[in-house]
Image: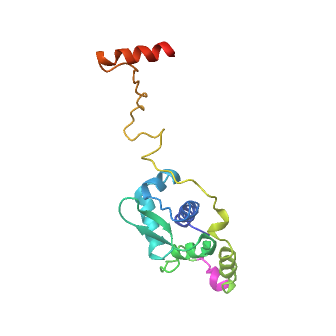
Amino acid sequence: MLNKKTLHAIHALVHIASLPQGVSISTTELSRQLHLSVSYLESLLKVLRENKLVCSTRGPGGGYELALPASQLSVWSVAQAFDDRSKPQAPTSVYQIDLDALLGGAIESQFQSILSSIFIGNYTHEMEPSDTRNGPNDWRFGFKPLAPSYVPVAPNSVFQLSQFMGLRATA
């Protein structure tokens, strides 16, 4: 079975893959959209970056992008990045049966073949990049937007009064 970290990483990759080509997303924006904490998301992205599934760019306008096309990125490659079976685990009871040894790895090979045939690109849809700094309804400090300024149409001096009166009379 897939653990929660693997499932969250798959969701993050699907979301990153849904962005237009060449557009990166910051961890803050991704955490807001996935409803995960920034620190937890950074720990997931660190593992994905170390396994060369995503690449990152620092600085303004930086963020995370897929390192491979979404059509070539299988769910199995994500599962391998978060696989906990490499760590030795102590048996929890005396009666615990090692299913892998009992079935000769048949379940594992079936699981691997199923996840290898599922690609991240199968679940993506093109999204518009959202920028929290430029959205009209998302104000950074919680202030309401300013009302449009009213510019009166009037003469600047007494010398322009005749021109203004001439425009008013024809209108």
Structure colour scheme: rainbow
Q: Quadrant of residue 68?
A: bottom right
> Who's the residue at 62% across and 79% down the image?
97
- Name above or below for residue 126 compared with residue 135: below
Of residues 6 and 53, which is closer to you in this image? Answer: 53
Position of 98 compared to 41: left or right? right
Of residues 100 and 45, which is closer to you in this image? Answer: 45
> Who's the residue at 56% across and 53% down the image?
128
Of residues 37 and 109, which is closer to you in this image? Answer: 37
> Who's the residue at 56% across and 60% down the image?
19
Position of 155 compared to 45: left or right? left
Q: Quadrant of residue 146?
A: top left
96 drawn magenta: yes
Image position, residue 110 (x, y; %) = 70, 79
Image position, residue 59 (x, y; %) = 35, 62
- Name above or below for residue 99 compared with residue 5: below
Count of marks overlaid on the render: 0
Q: Quadrant of the N terminus?
A: bottom right
42 drawn magenta: no
Range of magenta residues: 95-102
- Name above or below for residue 168 compared with residue 57: above
Image position, residue 36 (x, y; %) = 48, 54
Query: Can residue 156 be seen by looking at this rendering?
Result: yes
> Who's the residue at 38% across and 18% down the image?
154
Query: Can residue 84 be seen by looking at this rendering?
Result: no
Image position, residue 31 (x, y; %) = 47, 54
